Image (cartoon, helix red, strand yellow):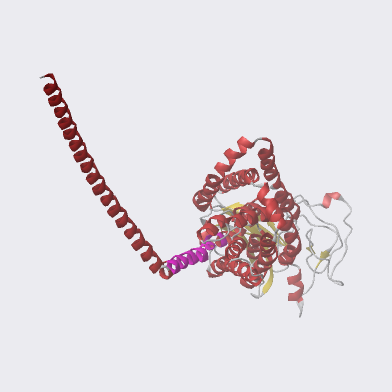
């Protein structure tokens, strides 16, 4: 049943039924309203949902152009509840609508995105009583199906079955297992902070001083990382997702993030300069504390022009700057507690592996819904972002004629972004479900990032095997000859030693026989002398 109201008798009698304006309704059309004396509080409606301002009833007859007037008065419809924001998957919601339109015969309801929600049923239109300050009301039921934003659109038809107007009910759906998502966000934040502590504790300040004296490589890498990559991500988002603000923002923030730890591993596998890669990772992380907020504040406003929500610039800036705290803490540990720093240095690789395993196991389980959202555009954009990063770093370093190992390191460091930082920033700062939907695009880039590198690694292995077979065979022959000569020499030495031993034995036997002969001769001489 509709809500009850106190009697309303204000104003002089009019020829047409009054249509009272609701709180946020547009001003009345000139020449089509009366202003009754409504000074007494006794005439205020008792229902807060359909509260009516009693200063401007409006009415009119159906004529040419009236349809445009009705469409302008879409705010002459209110819902109870006013909106379905942040409801959970799998829930059903009963909604009541009220209107002051003069003629409503039937109502239809549909959703903007049938993947997110579904209208289960729409009730019959019912007329309000003379004491009510609304003309018609009705009900409908909507079910939340999947995470996302949506709108329920009600269309009103008059007695001639012509459209009298439309009204929209905003809706957003959260994950049914939102608590697991929150746990993942908190644990990922702790792991990222610990990783930054380890990084600060293992930085070799002497190596940094040496690179600072000759900073060509790191400077080129920083230019590629924080000028090329954000611009590439911004343009790619505009091309791939022209009407999707979340897609543009997620891809753009991914392009603004520092280099990832996996770049060091791939640099080693592809024969690049590992020292330069480590230094670029460190410098890009430090510069991120200022570069990420500046880029989001600059081009982020361009992306969010048509968005229904606002980027929390302050929260992102505070969050990124807060990542410098664990890094500085790690540097202090290295300075004052070198033994602890050595332990943290040993934990650096296991920590990086644990974060990767955590993201690709529990993280994938929590974000299984992302795979339902993937389409050809998101996959292509996720592949293109790192691929263009690799190419831009390689081209710039080649133009500057840097050594091949430096080119490889700069190329890899430019293309690989720290996806965990991008995901954490989005989930931590954006409202839900915007944060949970936006992480799909950094996730696509993270999944597609290794593909060009793995392809390059396979090609490199095949090339090395194909171009150096003779050298390998020659080396094998040399080793075989050396082994044979060694065995032959050992055999000769053994035979020679045996011969020398035999000769020494014969000499010893001859010497003994001579000694015995001399001794016999001496004995014979003594005997003859005695005789």
**Quadrant of residue 256 within the rendered picture:** bottom right
- Residue 480 relative to residue 181: left or right: left
Q: Which of 437 and 68 is in front in this view?
A: 437
- Residue 434 relative to residue 458: left or right: right
Q: Which of 144 and 482 is in front in this view?
A: 482
Q: Is residue 463 magenta?
A: yes
Instruction: State the extent of the magenta-drawn residues as a range.
Output: 445-464
- Residue 110 relative to residue 215: left or right: left
Q: Position of residue 126 (x, y in %)?
A: 65, 61
**Principal SS element in the magenta part?**
helix
Q: Position of residue 323 (x, y in %)?
A: 68, 47
Q: Does the magenta stretch include residue 516?
A: no
Q: Is residue 112 at all visible to an observer of this figure? A: no
- Residue 297 relative to residue 477: left or right: right
Q: Is residue 197 above or below residue 523?
A: below
Q: Where is residue 402 in the image (x, y as percent from the top left)?
A: 63, 67
Q: Where is residue 394 in the image (x, y as percent from the top left)?
A: 60, 68
Q: Is residue 211 at all visible to an observer of this figure? A: yes
Query: Which quarter of the rendered picture does the C terminus lie within?
Result: top left
Q: Which of 131 and 29 is in front in this view?
A: 29
**Quadrant of residue 17 within the rendered picture:** bottom right
Q: In this view, does 513 lie above or below 149?
A: above
Q: Which of 89 and 276 is in front in this view?
A: 276
The residue positioned 55% from the left and 67% from the top of the image is 383
């Amino acid at each position: 049943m509709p809500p009850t109201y106190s009697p309303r008798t204000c104003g002089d009698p009019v020829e047409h039924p009054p249509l009272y304006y609701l709180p946020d309704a547009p001003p009345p059309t000139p020449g089509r309203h009366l202003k009754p004396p409504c000074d007494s509080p006794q005439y205020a409606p008792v229902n807060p949902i359909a509260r009516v301002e009693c200063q401007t009833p409006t009415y009119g007859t159906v004529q040419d152009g009236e349809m445009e007037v009705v469409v302008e008065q879409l705010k002459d419809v209110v819902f109870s509840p006013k909106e379905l924001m942040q409801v959970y998957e799998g829930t059903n919601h009963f909604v009541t609508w009220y209107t002051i339109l003069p003629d409503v015969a039937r109502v239809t309801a549909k959703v903007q995105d049938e993947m997110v929600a579904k209208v289960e049923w729409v009730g019959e239109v019912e007329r309000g009583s003379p004491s009510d300050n609304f003309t018609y009301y009705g009900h409908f039921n909507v079910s939340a199906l999947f995470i996302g934003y949506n709108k329920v659109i009600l269309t009103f038809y008059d007695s001639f079955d012509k459209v009298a107007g439309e009204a929209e009910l905003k809706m957003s759906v959260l994950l049914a297992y939102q608590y697991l998502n929150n746990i993942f966000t908190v644990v990922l934040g702790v792991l990222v902070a610990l990783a930054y502590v380890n990084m600060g504790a293992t930085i070799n300040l002497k190596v940094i001083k040496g690179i600072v004296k000759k900073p060509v490589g790191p400077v080129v890498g920083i230019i590629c990382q924080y000028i090329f990559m954000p611009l590439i991500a911004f343009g790619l988002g505009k091309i791939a997702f022209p009407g999707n603000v979340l897609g543009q923002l997620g891809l753009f923030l991914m392009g603004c993030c520092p280099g990832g730890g996996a770049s060091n591993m791939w640099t080693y596998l592809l024969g690049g300069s590992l020292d330069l890669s480590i230094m670029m990772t460190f410098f890009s992380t430090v510069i991120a504390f200022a570069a990420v907020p500046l880029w989001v504040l600059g081009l982020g406003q361009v992306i969010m022009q048509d968005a229904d929500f606002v980027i929390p610039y302050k929260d992102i800036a505070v969050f990124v700057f807060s990542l410098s705290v664990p890094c500085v803490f790690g540097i202090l540990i290295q300075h004052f507690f070198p033994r602890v720093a050595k332990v943290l240095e040993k934990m650096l690789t296991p920590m990086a592996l644990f974060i990767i395993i955590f993201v690709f196991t529990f993280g994938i389980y929590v974000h299984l819904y992302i795979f339902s959202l993937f389409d050809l555009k998101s996959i292509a954009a996720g592949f293109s972002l790192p691929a263009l990063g690799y190419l831009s770093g390689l081209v710039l370093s080649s133009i500057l004629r840097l050594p091949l190992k430096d080119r490889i390191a700069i190329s890899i460091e430019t293309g690989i972004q720290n996806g965990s930082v991008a995901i954490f920033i989005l989930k931590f700062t954006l409202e839900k479900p915007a944060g949970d939907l936006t992480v799909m695009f950094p996730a696509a880039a993270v999944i597609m990032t290794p593909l060009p590198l793995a392809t390059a690694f396979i090609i490199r292995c095949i090339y090395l095997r194909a171009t150096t077979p003779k050298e390998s065979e020659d080396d094998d022959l040399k080793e075989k000859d050396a082994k044979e000569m060694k065995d032959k020499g050992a055999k000769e030495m053994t035979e020679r030693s045996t011969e020398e031993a035999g000769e020494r034995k014969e000499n010893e036997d001859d010497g003994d026989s001579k000694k015995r002969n001399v001794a016999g001769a001496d004995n014979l001489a003594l005997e003859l002398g005695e005789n």
